[in-house]
Amino acid sequence: MRPMPASPPVRFVLLRPRNPENLGAAARALRNFGLDDWAIVELATHDFAAARRVAVHAEDLLDRPRLVRTLDEAVADCAWVVGTSSRPVRGKRRLAPDQVAREAAARAGEGRTAVVFGDERSGLTRDEMLRCHDLSSIPTDHAQPSVNLAQAVLLYAYEVRRAATATRAGASAPGATEADLSAVEGALREALRAGRFLAGPERHAVRDLAATLRRARLSPREARLWKAALRTLLRRLGS
Protein backbone atom coordinates (compact mmCIF):
# COMPACT_ATOMS: atom_id res chain seq x y z
CA MET A 1 0.00 0.00 0.00
CA ARG A 2 1.33 3.45 -0.94
CA PRO A 3 2.02 5.58 2.17
CA MET A 4 -0.24 8.59 2.64
CA PRO A 5 1.44 11.98 2.15
CA ALA A 6 2.20 14.13 5.15
CA SER A 7 -0.69 16.43 6.01
CA PRO A 8 -0.25 20.18 6.44
CA PRO A 9 0.08 21.23 10.10
CA VAL A 10 -3.55 21.60 11.18
CA ARG A 11 -4.91 21.57 14.74
CA PHE A 12 -8.54 20.68 15.37
CA VAL A 13 -9.87 22.72 18.31
CA LEU A 14 -13.09 21.58 20.02
CA LEU A 15 -14.81 24.09 22.31
CA ARG A 16 -16.84 22.74 25.22
CA PRO A 17 -17.66 19.30 23.73
CA ARG A 18 -20.49 17.75 25.78
CA ASN A 19 -21.18 14.38 24.21
CA PRO A 20 -18.60 11.66 24.96
CA GLU A 21 -19.59 9.70 21.84
CA ASN A 22 -18.84 12.80 19.75
CA LEU A 23 -15.44 13.00 21.40
CA GLY A 24 -14.65 9.39 20.58
CA ALA A 25 -15.96 9.66 17.03
CA ALA A 26 -13.93 12.83 16.46
CA ALA A 27 -10.77 11.02 17.62
CA ARG A 28 -11.53 8.17 15.22
CA ALA A 29 -12.11 10.64 12.37
CA LEU A 30 -8.72 12.25 12.97
CA ARG A 31 -7.02 8.86 13.02
CA ASN A 32 -8.81 7.86 9.80
CA PHE A 33 -6.90 10.59 7.99
CA GLY A 34 -3.57 10.43 9.80
CA LEU A 35 -4.13 13.50 12.00
CA ASP A 36 -3.39 13.70 15.72
CA ASP A 37 -3.09 17.40 16.64
CA TRP A 38 -6.20 18.39 18.55
CA ALA A 39 -7.03 20.60 21.52
CA ILE A 40 -10.11 20.63 23.75
CA VAL A 41 -11.21 23.87 25.41
CA GLU A 42 -13.34 23.56 28.56
CA LEU A 43 -14.08 19.86 28.30
CA ALA A 44 -17.73 19.42 29.31
CA THR A 45 -17.73 15.62 29.68
CA HIS A 46 -15.45 13.23 31.52
CA ASP A 47 -17.12 10.01 30.40
CA PHE A 48 -14.06 8.72 28.61
CA ALA A 49 -15.30 5.15 28.87
CA ALA A 50 -18.20 6.01 26.53
CA ALA A 51 -15.84 7.94 24.28
CA ARG A 52 -13.44 5.01 24.02
CA ARG A 53 -16.22 2.68 22.87
CA VAL A 54 -16.56 4.61 19.60
CA ALA A 55 -12.90 5.67 19.21
CA VAL A 56 -12.06 2.44 17.37
CA HIS A 57 -8.26 2.21 16.87
CA ALA A 58 -7.96 5.82 18.07
CA GLU A 59 -8.13 5.26 21.81
CA ASP A 60 -4.62 6.61 22.24
CA LEU A 61 -5.78 10.05 21.03
CA LEU A 62 -8.20 10.14 23.96
CA ASP A 63 -5.30 9.43 26.30
CA ARG A 64 -3.40 12.56 25.27
CA PRO A 65 -5.63 15.41 24.15
CA ARG A 66 -4.38 18.94 24.77
CA LEU A 67 -6.78 20.19 27.46
CA VAL A 68 -6.80 23.99 27.79
CA ARG A 69 -8.96 26.63 29.46
CA THR A 70 -9.31 29.21 26.67
CA LEU A 71 -9.45 29.50 22.91
CA ASP A 72 -6.50 31.92 23.07
CA GLU A 73 -4.38 29.22 24.69
CA ALA A 74 -5.41 26.63 22.11
CA VAL A 75 -4.41 28.77 19.10
CA ALA A 76 -1.53 30.86 20.47
CA ASP A 77 1.09 29.12 18.31
CA CYS A 78 -1.07 29.05 15.15
CA ALA A 79 -0.57 31.36 12.17
CA TRP A 80 -4.12 31.03 10.78
CA VAL A 81 -7.32 30.44 12.79
CA VAL A 82 -10.53 29.38 11.03
CA GLY A 83 -13.82 29.14 12.90
CA THR A 84 -16.61 26.85 11.71
CA SER A 85 -19.97 28.62 11.72
CA SER A 86 -22.70 29.41 9.20
CA ARG A 87 -23.49 32.75 10.86
CA PRO A 88 -22.20 35.79 8.94
CA VAL A 89 -19.70 38.17 10.52
CA ARG A 90 -18.74 41.43 8.84
CA GLY A 91 -15.18 41.52 7.57
CA LYS A 92 -14.61 37.77 7.76
CA ARG A 93 -14.00 35.65 4.69
CA ARG A 94 -16.28 32.62 4.38
CA LEU A 95 -14.62 29.52 2.99
CA ALA A 96 -15.86 26.05 2.12
CA PRO A 97 -14.09 23.12 3.84
CA ASP A 98 -12.06 22.25 0.73
CA GLN A 99 -10.91 25.88 0.43
CA VAL A 100 -9.75 25.81 4.06
CA ALA A 101 -7.79 22.62 3.43
CA ARG A 102 -6.13 23.92 0.27
CA GLU A 103 -5.16 27.20 1.90
CA ALA A 104 -3.85 25.36 4.97
CA ALA A 105 -1.64 23.34 2.63
CA ALA A 106 -0.46 26.50 0.86
CA ARG A 107 0.28 28.15 4.22
CA ALA A 108 2.07 25.12 5.69
CA GLY A 109 5.46 26.80 5.48
CA GLU A 110 4.15 29.81 7.41
CA GLY A 111 2.93 27.85 10.43
CA ARG A 112 0.09 25.87 11.91
CA THR A 113 -3.58 26.28 11.02
CA ALA A 114 -6.32 25.89 13.65
CA VAL A 115 -9.83 24.79 12.68
CA VAL A 116 -12.19 25.66 15.54
CA PHE A 117 -15.51 23.91 16.30
CA GLY A 118 -18.14 25.17 18.75
CA ASP A 119 -20.16 23.08 21.16
CA GLU A 120 -23.00 20.82 20.07
CA ARG A 121 -25.79 23.08 21.32
CA SER A 122 -24.94 26.58 20.23
CA GLY A 123 -21.69 26.47 18.23
CA LEU A 124 -19.24 29.36 18.44
CA THR A 125 -20.17 32.52 20.28
CA ARG A 126 -19.90 35.85 18.46
CA ASP A 127 -16.77 36.75 20.44
CA GLU A 128 -15.20 33.43 19.45
CA MET A 129 -16.03 34.03 15.79
CA LEU A 130 -14.48 37.49 16.01
CA ARG A 131 -11.37 35.88 17.51
CA CYS A 132 -10.92 33.78 14.36
CA HIS A 133 -9.23 35.16 11.26
CA ASP A 134 -11.72 33.60 8.82
CA LEU A 135 -14.86 31.49 8.95
CA SER A 136 -15.91 28.31 7.21
CA SER A 137 -19.16 26.38 6.88
CA ILE A 138 -20.36 23.18 5.29
CA PRO A 139 -22.82 23.86 2.45
CA THR A 140 -25.71 21.84 3.89
CA ASP A 141 -29.32 21.87 2.74
CA HIS A 142 -31.45 24.60 4.33
CA ALA A 143 -33.99 22.02 5.50
CA GLN A 144 -31.37 20.40 7.78
CA PRO A 145 -28.48 22.86 8.17
CA SER A 146 -26.83 21.60 11.36
CA VAL A 147 -24.13 18.93 11.26
CA ASN A 148 -23.11 16.66 14.13
CA LEU A 149 -19.78 17.71 15.67
CA ALA A 150 -17.99 14.45 14.89
CA GLN A 151 -19.32 14.49 11.33
CA ALA A 152 -17.98 18.01 10.87
CA VAL A 153 -14.56 16.97 12.18
CA LEU A 154 -14.59 14.01 9.79
CA LEU A 155 -15.40 16.20 6.80
CA TYR A 156 -12.67 18.76 7.50
CA ALA A 157 -10.15 16.00 8.29
CA TYR A 158 -10.96 14.37 4.96
CA GLU A 159 -10.45 17.64 3.09
CA VAL A 160 -7.13 18.25 4.85
CA ARG A 161 -5.94 14.81 3.79
CA ARG A 162 -7.24 15.28 0.25
CA ALA A 163 -5.40 18.61 -0.04
CA ALA A 164 -2.20 16.88 1.07
CA THR A 165 -2.46 14.46 -1.84
CA ALA A 166 -3.00 17.26 -4.38
CA THR A 167 -0.80 20.09 -3.13
CA ARG A 168 2.82 20.42 -2.20
CA ALA A 169 3.35 23.24 0.27
CA GLY A 170 5.59 25.97 -1.08
CA ALA A 171 8.80 27.06 0.57
CA SER A 172 7.17 30.07 2.18
CA ALA A 173 8.79 31.67 5.20
CA PRO A 174 7.34 31.07 8.68
CA GLY A 175 4.45 33.38 9.53
CA ALA A 176 3.69 35.31 12.69
CA THR A 177 1.77 33.25 15.23
CA GLU A 178 -1.51 34.31 16.76
CA ALA A 179 0.37 35.17 19.96
CA ASP A 180 2.61 37.52 17.93
CA LEU A 181 -0.42 39.14 16.28
CA SER A 182 -2.28 39.50 19.59
CA ALA A 183 0.74 41.36 20.99
CA VAL A 184 0.67 43.72 17.98
CA GLU A 185 -3.06 44.25 18.49
CA GLY A 186 -2.47 45.06 22.17
CA ALA A 187 0.23 47.61 21.30
CA LEU A 188 -2.04 49.12 18.65
CA ARG A 189 -4.86 49.48 21.19
CA GLU A 190 -2.59 51.26 23.68
CA ALA A 191 -1.22 53.63 21.03
CA LEU A 192 -4.70 54.51 19.77
CA ARG A 193 -5.88 55.26 23.30
CA ALA A 194 -2.83 57.39 24.06
CA GLY A 195 -3.38 59.31 20.81
CA ARG A 196 -7.10 59.79 21.68
CA PHE A 197 -8.27 57.97 18.58
CA LEU A 198 -10.18 55.82 21.09
CA ALA A 199 -11.91 58.41 23.22
CA GLY A 200 -14.81 56.23 24.34
CA PRO A 201 -15.85 52.57 24.12
CA GLU A 202 -13.63 50.60 21.79
CA ARG A 203 -16.46 48.95 19.79
CA HIS A 204 -14.85 47.34 16.73
CA ALA A 205 -12.19 49.86 15.58
CA VAL A 206 -9.11 48.03 16.92
CA ARG A 207 -10.42 44.66 15.84
CA ASP A 208 -11.03 45.88 12.29
CA LEU A 209 -7.61 47.53 12.05
CA ALA A 210 -5.88 44.43 13.42
CA ALA A 211 -7.79 42.28 10.93
CA THR A 212 -5.96 44.00 8.06
CA LEU A 213 -2.63 42.97 9.60
CA ARG A 214 -3.83 39.39 9.98
CA ARG A 215 -4.88 39.29 6.35
CA ALA A 216 -1.42 40.53 5.39
CA ARG A 217 0.11 37.31 6.81
CA LEU A 218 3.00 39.05 8.56
CA SER A 219 6.30 37.32 9.15
CA PRO A 220 7.58 37.09 12.76
CA ARG A 221 10.08 39.86 11.97
CA GLU A 222 7.34 42.12 10.57
CA ALA A 223 5.20 41.51 13.67
CA ARG A 224 8.12 42.46 15.92
CA LEU A 225 8.72 45.59 13.84
CA TRP A 226 5.06 46.63 14.12
CA LYS A 227 5.11 46.09 17.88
CA ALA A 228 8.38 48.03 18.30
CA ALA A 229 7.08 50.92 16.19
CA LEU A 230 3.84 51.12 18.14
CA ARG A 231 5.66 50.93 21.50
CA THR A 232 7.98 53.76 20.42
CA LEU A 233 5.00 55.84 19.32
CA LEU A 234 3.30 55.12 22.64
CA ARG A 235 6.34 56.35 24.60
CA ARG A 236 6.45 59.54 22.54
CA LEU A 237 2.75 60.15 23.10
CA GLY A 238 3.22 59.67 26.82
CA SER A 239 6.12 62.12 27.05
Image: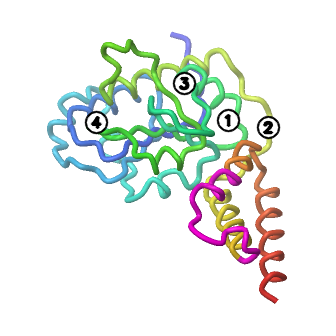
Secondary structure at numbered mark 4: loop
What residue does disc 2 label? Answer: 172
Q: Which residue is drawn at 36% across and 45% down?
A: 15
Going from N to C along the chain, the mark reached first, 3 or 1, is 1
* Inter-mark Cα distance, 3 to 1: 12 Å
- Marks 4 and 2 in Cβ contact (< 8 Å): no
Going from N to C along the chain, the mark reached first, 4 or 1, is 1
Residue 127 lies, in percent from the top left, at 46, 51
| Crowding at mark 4 (Cα within 10 Å: few <14, some 14-19, many 20+) | some
* Inter-mark Cα distance, 4 to 1: 29 Å
Corner quadrant of residue 192: bottom right
Viewer-proximal residue, 69 or 35? 69
**Part of the protein shown in magenta:** 194-210
* Inter-mark Cα distance, 2 to 1: 8 Å
| Crowding at mark 3 (Cα within 10 Å: few <14, some 14-19, many 20+) | many
Is-magenta flag for residue 4?
no
What residue does disc 3 label? Answer: 160
Secondary structure at numbered mark 3: helix
Residue 70 lies, in percent from the top left, at 42, 57
* Inter-mark Cα distance, 3 to 4: 22 Å
Q: In this view, does 16 lie above or below 235?
A: above
* Inter-mark Cα distance, 3 to 2: 19 Å
Q: Nearer the viewer, mark 4 or mark 1?
A: 4
Disc 4 marks a residue whose amino acid type is Glu
Q: In this view, does 60 lie above or below 183?
A: above
What residue does disc 4 label? Answer: 120
Going from N to C along the chain, the mark reached first, 2 or 1, is 1
Secondary structure at numbered mark 2: loop
Disc 1 marks a residue whose amino acid type is Ala
Q: Where residue 108 is drawn, which disc sits there?
A: 1
Disc 2 marks a residue whose amino acid type is Ser
